[in-house]
Amino acid sequence: MVNTKVLFTSRFDNKVNMDQTTLATIPKLIAQVLAVYDVDAKAIFERVNIDISPENVSTDRVQMEKMSHLWEVATQATNDNEFGLIAASLFQPTYLKGIGLAWMVSANLEEGLRRFVKNSQLVNTSMQIELIENDDELLIQYQTPNMPTTKVKVHPCAIQLGVGFFLKMFRLAAVKNIPATAVYFTFPINDAQQKYEDYFQCPVVGDSSHNGIAFSKSVLNEMLPTHDPELVGFNEMAVDKYLLKMNTAETSKKVSKIITELLPTGCPSEEMIADKLFMSKRTLQRKLSKEQQSYSTLLNDVRFTLAKEYLTTKATSITEIAYQLGYSSPSTFARAFKKHEASSPLEYREAHQ
């Protein structure tokens, strides 16, 4: 008789997950994979409106909706439906920031795994993982959180990476081949069964009820040669600091959301935003200051992000875009856009068609 029990579940915060994002290091990994196929990554990222250039230091997170589009476009460009397995093979701990580095210096693989699962919202705010014990086998299983908001559809290649990177991380940390015992995907894999089994080197099941990967617990409990308690503590402090920043940036997210909703009716004032949030203008300014933000910065960020998206993905006239973004006239929009992007809206549209 198999003894099954749930050992651990990732923490899941509905408040945080209202904004579905992932680390900006993940699209950078995809850019690295595109290079393997000799595909122009710059053109792909411009098409999906994701900026991963070294000069862009304004954000370290990417919306999941854009990521889903990126996976789709990258798969089409490479003509490889198993693109995510290549991404998994190229995965490195630094793509997970402090969590990945803490994993590498944990006492054993299971300890590092639990540390990752506990803090997985840092990597992807929509992610929920369960660790399930079946006798001597440990199953790492993805769950779909129950949320009232519409979920972004997860691309199969993203799931390939999400399952495959565990194997890569275990092998890097243990500095040896760590065998999986079974792998499961919710989508069919019949046409590429051999590709999956070549990567995972174990039985792989498609059309399963869940996505996950299983390992022998005895293998996961072996002491790691890279174990360093001091480095574990240092990286855990960095992770806690990052998560605190994510959780306390709620006012900025709300302000950006309201600005986006109100722009088509004209440029909303700071007083209007404060009123929508049931607080005074001074309270709003204080809250944004704590998050190292300001109303004017958020307004410009929203405007120029939407402007670039409209100019590259919609056949909307520049005049109409100007009014949709709350500018008083097309000329005002053109001057502001040129100052920010060093090119006119028309020049930008022609360069990104």
Image (cartoon, rainbow, N blue to C red):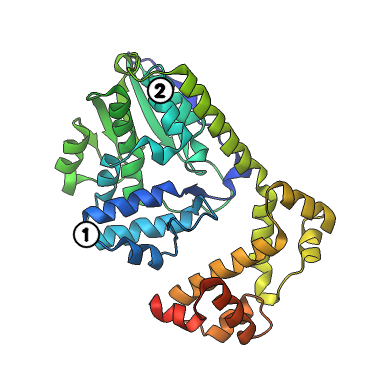
Relative to 204, does residue 263 appear above or below in the rendering? below
Q: Residues within 10 Å of mark 1 (few under 14, many from 20)?
A: few
Q: Nearer the viewer, residue 268 or 235?
A: 235
Q: Position of residue 260 (x, y in %)?
A: 63, 66
Image side of residue 281 versus residue 109, left or right: right
Mark identifier at residue 105: 2
Would residue 39 be seen by someone viewing this image from the given angle? yes
Q: Position of residue 294 (x, y in %)?
A: 71, 58
Residue annotated with mark 1: 38
For marks 2 and 1 on the same chain, the one whose residue lies earlier in the sequence: 1
Which element type, helix, strand or loop, lies under badge 1? loop
Would residue 131 be seen by someone viewing this image from the given angle? no
Mark identifier at residue 228: none
Q: Quadrant of residue 176?
A: top left
> Which amino acid is tagged 2?
Val
Q: Position of residue 340 (x, y in %)?
A: 56, 71
Q: Quadrant of the C terminus?
A: bottom left
Which element type, helix, strand or loop, lies under badge 2? loop
